[in-house]
Amino acid sequence: LLLWIRRDVRALRVTRLSRACRFLWRDYNASCHYWELADLYRKLFLASLVLFIQTDDGSSKLLRLVVASVTSALFLTALALVKPFKRFDDFYLACTANLLLACCFISGTVIQLCESADDMCKTLVGFESARGASEFVVVLTVAMLIASLLVVLFKTVSAVRMPTVRLTSSGRPPVLELSPECHFHGFISHCWGTGQDQTHTVVRQLQLLLPGVRIWLDVDNLDDVGRLEEAVADAMTFLVFLSAGYFRSFNCRRELYAALASNRPFIPIFEADVAKGGASIEALKAECRENCVEAAPAAYPNYSGPGEMLARVFEEAAPIVWVRVNAFQLESLKAVALRMLLHSPFYASRPAELADGVMVPGQAGPVAFSGPVTILVCRGNVGVLDLSELVKTAAGEGRGSTASAETVTIRDAEEALEGVNAAPLSGHVVFLLYLNDKTFLDAGGAVARLVQAAMDRGIAIAPVHEQEPSCGGVPFRNFFQQTPQVLQQQPYKLYNTVAVPLYPAPEHRTVSLRLILTSMGAVPCDAGPLQRRWQLLRRRIAVARLVRRRPAEPQQIVQP
């Protein structure tokens, strides 16, 4: 059976026979799908065939033990060199088991020598009697067993924490199987001038997050530019990296038409940063209408015009926004991986396994405050009230949080800091500063005045930088012109605190809100007591650094 399905297994193709025989090869790398057979032969030899050596008096001789020891040592060497297992914890467990087995056979040889003659035991082994040798073997075996179990435990924990994509429903790595007619899980199409660096990052990171995934990339797989259409048809999904000039590229349009002809699922990825070669969705749609006008292209003679292309690229599924910043990049990659898995033949019949999505160990999870928190907002800071409500809602999202959204209080900064009859501030207090194109440009300069007053009282500032241009997002360098100089100089140094970027896409906005809460002192919902105490200590240190001695003569804030 393994010989019959070897080509399908190595190509990760799904056939009825290979699926029925998965129990024989699923734990091994595709190139080592035969390893179960090799291990079966080893067990058969050590458990039965070795008894045919010296059948008359072999039980009292050393030859069987020597042969068994050599066989175990050779198999352990082959195991270490080939590394046939997909999972590291399986590999280390197999190595440990074979090492212990070899040690048992060697120990049996020592005991056999000591039982044959006491003088030989003392001369060759160094023990006075067979009892001493047996005690030594027992102690050594127990010590090796404990050490091996510790190593396996350490490696297992490391493997579990390895940053790779797992199914949220089960915590296990996803199954990467290919349809019978394909050799790649995805084909990534991009414009060399504005999207090459980004697509290389996408592919390399996906290969790290999804070990074993096969994605067609020009620098890795392009041998003949005339066979682009064949390469597109050889992949299960079609990844489109949308950047400025993509639809103007003739070869990119060839790939698009080939994907339409092969009816491949489109996974659009959108570069939004204009400085990195991006463009707005509307600009890309206009570019598509202008350039995707070929009549009956060779790859897809039934092409009906730009409307069909717009529907497949932009309307069939919302484009995934590509963000290259730390935790946000991980969310973009997770979204790409999830869509690829949804179109795989294995999960097409098991959609419930992907209903909860995918996760990566160490990703930004739900956070919560460990006590009452007061968030100060300035009404002159346009948009901050809506943002503060989002932050308050996010504070209560985690299950098992010690403080729900009701313990987060939002107060007007002007009333709390300058009001005559204002109630005293208690608990942990944070000033939420929403950085957009109107920040510090309000009439009267209330935002700058209140930020200064908050910092004079040792209140931590939580700056949030809007990234969506339609919501007032501007490059961060603009704030150095908008912000009064007194807040950029000692003793305030407002921008020494890194601003949390606020992205519009739902998956990225969730991460932004969690990072905002973390900057305010929240801790992960699954954090233990020690982690909570450490976070509290860090928050106190940060607040202590913000406490500045008020200048002898108050500095006048001058609007830029």
Image: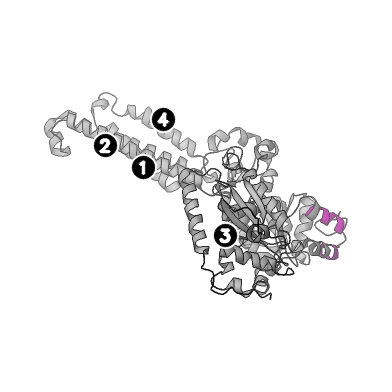
In space, the residues marked 4 and 2 are separated at their CA atoms by 27 Å
What kind of residue is marked 3?
Ile
The residue beneath circle 3 is: 459
Q: Position of residue 279 (x, y in %)?
A: 75, 65
In space, the residues marked 2 and 1 are separated at their CA atoms by 22 Å
In magenta, the rendered stretch is 287-313
Label 2: how many Cα within 10 Å (few below 14, some 14–19, many 20+): some
**Sooner in the amino-acid sequence: mark 3 or mark 4:** 4
Of tags 2 and 3, the one toward the viewer is 3
Query: Of all residues shown, which one is farthest toward the left?
Result: 119
The residue beneath circle 1 is: 74
Image check: 307 left or right of 109?
right
* Residue 104, image quadrant: top left
The residue beneath circle 2 is: 140
The residue beneath circle 4 is: 44
What kind of residue is marked 4?
Leu
Question: Compared to 295, does 482 lie above or below?
Answer: below
**Sooner in the amino-acid sequence: mark 2 or mark 1:** 1
